[in-house]
Amino acid sequence: MKRFPGVDFLELDALLSDEEKLIRETVRDFVDDMVKPIIEECHRDARTPLELVPKMAELGLFGSTIAEYGLPGLGNVSYGLILQELERGDSGLRSFVSVQSSLVMYPIYAFGSQAQRDRWIPALGSGEAIGCFGLTEPNFGSNPGGMSTTARLDGNEWVLNGSKQWITNGTLADVAVVWARTDDGIRGFLVEKDTPGFTSSDQHGKFSLRASTTSELGFVNCRIPADNLLPKTTGLKNALMCLNQARYGIAWGGLGAAMECYTTALEYAKERIQWNGQPIASHQLVQDKLVWMVTEITKGQLLAHQLGKLKDANRIKHFHISMGKKNNVWVARECARLAREVLGANGIVDDYPIIRHMLNIESVFTYEGTHDIHTLVVGEKITGIPAFNAPEQTVKAKPPTKATAAST
């Protein structure tokens, strides 16, 4: 199999440490050797490639930024590069690692008790246990604060009622991090597989993220021990902190999908002969598409790298992450579309990875905060005016002056 050459038009590798480059190359080899040979079949069969979990655990890909419990304790640029390479293989694979690391291990590590950490972090890090994250509901996606799932304390147990939708790894999970409304606000809970009153079922009919398990979770008088509350959760902000961890990784992952689409289109264009024995790469319109792709990928690399540096310095803000997720997933979406055009009819068959990435990115464009919601997050930062659910009159209009009245 042909090795992935990477995309480094602006010599950005000079910004990476030797360790960061080694980590990227290790995961790049894993994707080339173990993911790409099976991923099209997994996509066709709508199957999560669970056979890859032991190897990913061996490589330290689960909870890689945690320094305890024998985990690697990597920096955030390294973590980003891991997710970049995984999404180059498939968005579903990156989603698996992102959920396990950022949405399950992170909240347990950050908000859990010592006993919860000791039980779950080693098991999740080794791949012996799989987790999922239950926040989105059938009627509440972009507005998680409207959730209707409830948790009521009854003696030494919490009683959960409600449902969650679009949950990655839901039916595979040994433990679910579930967010529910209590008398004291929104809190996080650990719900274990096979708990009475807890059900999970898979979402069928997906044309996107087919190599990933997407589920619905249900809770009907589901009783869990009082100790299953994540004790340091105090409100919705804690769930959003988890999402920021995941969205940061998606900003890198989107670049991986974009790189795969770009390099596939570039190689195809140089080999596809058309019109007087010339490769289509010699045509101006094809070159325009390729130049757009490599330019936007390069800008996205700079953005992602700076996000990683800010995160390592504990200076990153949620609106920084929103810009990264919004921009780089949009770049991936456009690269997939342009690559499909370069490949023509071959762009819609899975002899090539383009259509699979194109389908996957439609989900990534929406989940972990839609493109439009992230636009509004950045918009609020630069204007100081929230526009998510704008009040009837945000800014009072000033009466026209004589000068403005004259000009109109």
Image: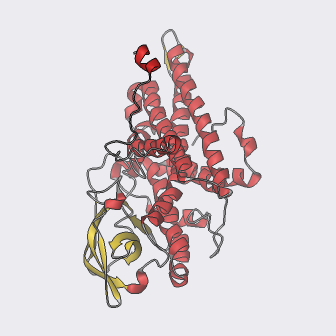
Determine whether 86 is above or below 403 in the image. Answer: below
Residue 334: percent from left, percent from top: 46, 32
Residue 380: percent from left, percent from top: 47, 44
Which of these two is toward me, 145 or 76?
Answer: 145
Which residue occupies the extreme left position in the image? Answer: 220
Point 32% across, 79% down: residue: 194
Residue 238: percent from left, percent from top: 47, 66
Residue 218 in sight from this viewpoint:
no
Q: How is the image coloured?
A: secondary structure
Could you tell me which quadrant the C terminus lies in?
top left
Which residue occupies the extreme top position in the image? Answer: 276
Which of these two is toward me, 205 or 1?
Answer: 205
Number of marks: 0
Point 47% across, 18% down: residue: 403
Residue 246 in sight from this viewpoint:
yes
Which of these two is toward me, 278 or 130?
Answer: 130
Which residue occupies the extreme front position in the image? Answer: 402
Point 38% across, 35% down: residue: 349
Could you tell me which quadrant the N terminus lies in?
top right
* Residue 225 located left or right of residue 202: right
Which of these two is toward me, 156 or 78?
Answer: 156
Determine whether 288 is above or below 101 in the image. Answer: above
Residue 268: percent from left, percent from top: 52, 28
